Structures are given as C-alpha cells and as structure tokens.
Image (cartoon, rainbow, N blue to C red):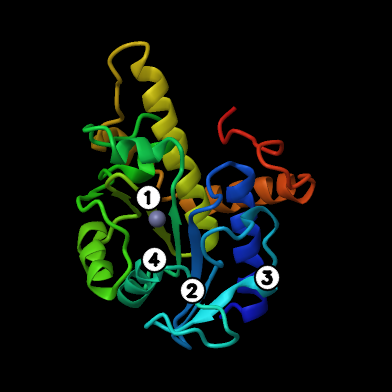
Amino acid sequence: MATEYELRGQLATCTRIFAMQGMIGVFGHVSVYQPELKRVFITPGMGSDKGSLRAEEMVPCDLSGKPLEGEQGPPLEWPIHTAIHAARPDALAVAHLHTPYATLFTIAKRKFQPVTLQGAISSDGVPLYPEAQLITNPARGEALLKVIADKRAVLLRGHGIVVAGKNLQEVLYTSLVLEDDAKKSWQAATLGEVGTISEEECRAFGAEIALERRAQRAWNYFAGLEARWDHQPATGRSELFP
Ligand SMILES: [Zn+2]
C-alpha cells in the first residue's frame, strides 16, 4: 500500500505536469484513492495554482466529499471522483480536465476514435456524458459512472474529460495520449478525411499489454522535465510525440 506521503507527492507531481502541458489551469482536478481507508486525496478547487502545487496542499476527504482535516473542502465536482473510486477497484486515480483538444470532441458532433497507435488504449472508443451540466451531486456522479462503465475515459458534453486509471502514472499517460489523439484528429481533418485505427488494429498493437511500462516511462520523462521547469505557463510545454 502506498503511503499518504507518497500519494500526496505523486498527486502534486502529476498535477504540475498537467499544468506544464497546458492541460489543467483555473479549472480541473486530480485525485488518488486509498481503498483500505476509503480516503480520497484531491487537488484544491477552482483558481488554485496547479503549476506550483505541493503535496501538503492536497485535500483529504471521504467518499461523501466530507473533508477529513482542515477547513478546506474538495472542489465542487468532487462526486466525479468519489463515484468512480467507490465503484471501480481498477480506478485508484481519476483526473477531470478541460483540455483544449479533447474538449473539442465534447462540442463537435463527431465520435472520438483513436488515430495513432498509442491511441489504441482507447480502442473501444470514449463515451459521451450527454448532459451539459457540472457533476456537483452524487446522483450526477452515479449517472457519469453508468456512462464511463469500465472504460478509461469519458467526454462531458460542452465541458471536458474524465480519465480513470489504476494509478496516477496511468492516468497521466492516458490523458496525454487522449489529448494528443484529439489534437492530431483536428489537425488531420484540415488536410482531408481522417483515418482511424480500427479495433482489430488496436488489439494487434497490444497497447494494453505494454501500458504499465509506457505509463511509467512517460511519467519518468515528464517528471524530469517538470523538475527543471520554471513554473511559468506554457514555457515548459513539451509534446508527447514530437
Ligand atoms: Zn469541470
């Protein structure tokens, strides 16, 4: 079992990398779950500076969103995190982001499908939560859970994305790949019809088998870049597949 100290540190690192990549800012939050203690650690809410977040700033809460220490509560959309953590033993980390490119697929009437081999981790597509509303109560959290089901990610209409994974490394990598595939889909569409990677091709690529190794290597790479980032918006930004 990872210690509270380790989880808080990883959550801070993951969130700073998202900030460096321009994938989190005024909005968005990331969480990690300790199932043995039914305890969620989540980043502070709207307006907090995600690019300089430290381990001690994380908000611990229970599965009903009640803060477990201090005055500060979790972000408004905490039910996104608690609904998924409570229901899925394979989702010990969850990110809710309003990333620039994947969010386009919550607006355009166009189904998201992988367009690169790395995108094969979303071989079965990314479902859309159809309500244009914030997930601010447990009933909406449950409705979101039904849409994401056992998948890695879900699009929230006119809003953003939610990515779940077995740890923060997996959530970081899955989010980077989803954002990159969304960006490439949009860029390729300006050139002509967009070719997608079929479910069969995705399976043949075996993205699932190598996910843990790829996620850890991407984490090490981006954590290294983050460590020497000057913590100013946009200046540390680096593409996943340059
Ligand atoms: Zn949101």
What amino acid is labelled 2 in the image? Answer: Pro
Disc number lying in front (4 or 1): 4
Helix, strand or loop status at disc 4: loop
Residue 8 at x, y percent in the picture: 63, 72
Alpha-carbon distance for marks 4 and 3? 21 Å
Check residue 216 in the rendering and tell me which mark sits there, or answer none.
none
Check residue 77 in the rendering and tell me which mark sits there, or answer none.
4
**Of pointers 4 and 3, the one earlier in the residue sequence:** 3
Alpha-carbon distance for marks 2 and 3? 15 Å
**Of pointers 2 and 3, the one earlier in the residue sequence:** 3
Q: Is mark 4 within 8 Å of ligand 1?
A: yes
Find residue 194 and report its image quarter: top left
What amino acid is labelled 4 in the image? Answer: Glu
Q: CB atoms at circles 4 and 1 under 8 Å apart?
A: no
What amino acid is labelled 1 in the image? Answer: Ile
What amino acid is labelled 3 in the image? Answer: Ala
The residue that label 1 is drawn on is 161
